[in-house]
Each structure stands twice: as C-alpha cells, then as structure tokens.
Amino acid sequence: MSGLAERINRLSESQTIAMARKARELKASGIDIISLSLGEPDFPTPAAIKTAAKKAIDSDFSYYTHVSGYLELREAISKKFKRDNNLDYSADQIVVSTGAKQSIANAILSLVNPGEEVIVPAPYWVSYLELIKLAEGIAVVVKAGIDQDFKIKPEQLKATIGPKTKLIVFSSPCNPTGSVYSKSELKALAEVVASFPDLYVLSDEIYEHINFAGRHESIAQFDFIKDRVVTVNGVSKGFAMTGWRVGYLGAPLWIAKACDKIQGQVTSATCSIAQKAAHAAMEMNPDTIFPMRDEFKKRRDLVLGLLKEIPGLKSTTPPGAFYLFPDVSFYFGKSDGPFKIASGTDLCAFLLEKAHVALVPGAAFGDDSCVRFSYATSEDKLKEAMKRIATALAALT
C-alpha cells in the first residue's frame, strides 16, 4: 500500500509464522497436516509456575509494575544469572520484556544507528535481519555451513568487521541449527571482539536449558568483554511458557537504561501475572525441567535415525534446542512431474502439498540448501511425519 511507512515496506513476514498459518489453513479445510514448523514445546507449564500465577491473581497483583519488571523479579533474575551462568548483573541492569524478541528489539534499537552494520552469522533466527532493518542498520551476513557445524570461526568474524560495524548478534544454542558454541569457541570470538573497542555483542540464549552437551556457556563470562555484551534469555522454551510472553536481558547499565526508555514508550511493563509466573521459574532448581530436555533429546535421536534412512539428506547431530537443519540439496533438480525442486523453499512447498508435513525453508534462516525440522511434538507425530516425508521424496526423480 502506498500509504504505508517505508519501514513497514522493508520488513518481511516471519516465514515460520507464515508456514504455521498455511498449515492451519490446510487443517481447517480438512487436510491432516503435521506441523514441524513452529518452535514451541508441547509440554504444559510446570505446576509450581501455574500456582504462582494463580496466587498472583487471587492476591490482586494486577497493577502496573516498573517498566523493566518489578524489583523482586529482577533480583531473582540477577541470582539466576549468577547461579546458572556465573554472570554478575545487578537488578538495575536487567530489563524484563514481553518475550525475548522484544528484548532483542530493545537492544538493537538502543545500539544501532542508521547505516551502521550488524554482523549476523548464518544460519540465523528469522527476526534478526528484520529488527536490524527496523533500526535502519545494515545486516552483514557471515555464512557458516554444515561442514563447520553452522558455527562461524574467529577469522571469519575478524575479516567481516569494518569501520561501520557496531554489533554482532547470534544465538547459542542456535535456532535453527541446534548448534552450540563451546567455551573455547566463545572465548576465541570474544578475543576478536576485544580488539575492536566499539563493537558490541548481543547473545541470544533463549535455548539455554535445552542443551544436551553439558553446561551452557555465555560469552559474557569473559571479563575482558563483559561490559560490551547484552545477554538475552527468557522462559518460553526451557519452561514451556511460550504464551506467557516473558523475556529478559542483562546488559551494561547504560544499555539497560536505554532499553527501559524504549520499552516505556512502546509497551511499558509486561503482564504483572506473567511476571509472577516468571519469578517462580527463576527460583526453580533447573534440575526440575531436565525431564523436558531429556525428552527432546530422545526425539532428536528418533528423528535423526529416521532421517538417516532417507537417501540424500545430510544432518549434523545438534547438541541443543529442538531443531534439525538438514542439507536437502541432493533433491535439487529432481521432479515428480508437476513439482520441480530447485531450492529448500521448493522442497518445503512440495512436502506440504504431497506429504502434508509443514517445515520451514532454510532461506528464512539464510541457507536455502537446508530446511528446518522442529521436533517439539510427540513421537507418534514425528514417526508419521518422517514416514510421509520419506514416501514423498522417493517419488522425486
């Protein structure tokens, strides 16, 4: 529409949300669609968290809180950072938002000026590039393929930094690949960052608790760059609280104040009841949510085993999150007659129509030779989905 602001015209719709919408539309028409598109745990929110929310309702905790979240919640997050990550963020360095996505948006809008560059390792989460566009920054994509476990190397980072570089944004565990940076890998990247004093880091750690490889590592742990790192986290993935809409960040005080300032004009504080629920989550022993993590690992192994039986699909064994990001380029140039496959996007369209399985094209994440499987659903659905995919792909010649 000609009357829309140019900032809207520049934005693209989230392809994960778009694929989920298509799947819902087909389901509504009576087609049995199995959706492996959205990254949403299928577990209920833990009982102790729901109890805290009910208590908050019954005690009329229903008024505005501080824009950044009420003090006791921010103190609980501060303790969580210390307990789980050995990070020292005081309560006034923490901003609680309506989901980790808002936390990321707040940080990018606070730091990036028009024309400044933001380094984004690919594959990347779909919203990073769009939020950079919203800030009128320039995304500089650094590709890390399946041959390097989808993780960038220090020399790649160093070669990409220029006079306009302001920020690097990445996730670990990663959406869409499930890759996890080790402590030594993060330290090597941090040492590159340290040599550029005007460069900042936004570390998206929303999948922290879905880590099959051991202890989660945060890049802010390194003292020599901690004053230039924004650490983003939340409760949606690890605590099965997607609909509660609570995320948070820890940052240098001046950045936290800037994020509070933006949020105060856009949304103000997130829901007071959801904050009480998040407070309970922060005080839970992380061991109590390990059964969810362990179930995700079982599902990963199940899908990986079935995927290996399908000719041509190539995957890593991701140690985190709940995604597989297989390379599907073996099928490029193949056809079943009406459908000709030239990309991961084509393959997703083919599988949606022929197999009635919804996946997300790798193009949404910066690599169209791959597609994203979310295994955050039941084993029965995963088995049926993989059976349908195998049958449909076998028809391509």
Image (cartoon, helix red, strand yellow):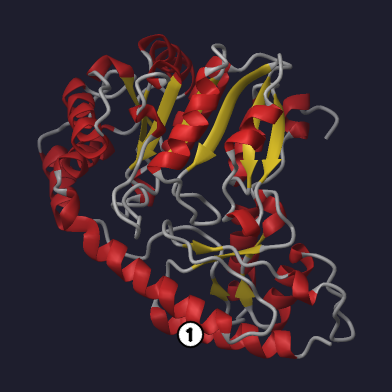
Looking at the image, which is closer to me, 11 or 211? 211
Q: Secondary structure at mark 1?
A: helix
Q: Residue at x 38, y 49 (%)?
A: 243
Q: Residue at x 85, y 80 (%)?
A: 334
The residue that disc 1 covers is 383
Q: Amino acid at mark 1?
A: Lys
The answer to whether residue 314 is left or right of residue 102 is right
Q: Quadrant of residue 240?
A: bottom left
Spot occupied by residue 146 in the image (x, y as percentages of width and height) = 63, 59
Looking at the image, which is closer to me, 74 or 200? 200
The answer to whether residue 320 is left or right of residue 17 is left
Looking at the image, which is closer to me, 369 or 135? 369
Q: Where is 317 relative to 59, above or below?
A: below
Q: Residue at x 10, y 35 (%)?
A: 59
| Residue lying furthest top | 254
The quadrant of the rendering that contains the C terminus is bottom right
The answer to whether residue 101 is left or right of residue 355 is left
Spot occupied by residue 164 in the image (x, y as percentages of width and height) = 70, 15
Spot occupied by residue 61 in the image (x, y as percentages of width and height) = 17, 31
Q: Residue at x 18, y 30 (%)?
A: 79
Q: How many marks?
A: 1
Q: Where is 283 relative to 145, above or below?
A: above
Q: Quadrant of residue 217?
A: top left
Spot occupied by residue 24 in the image (x, y as percentages of width and height) = 58, 67
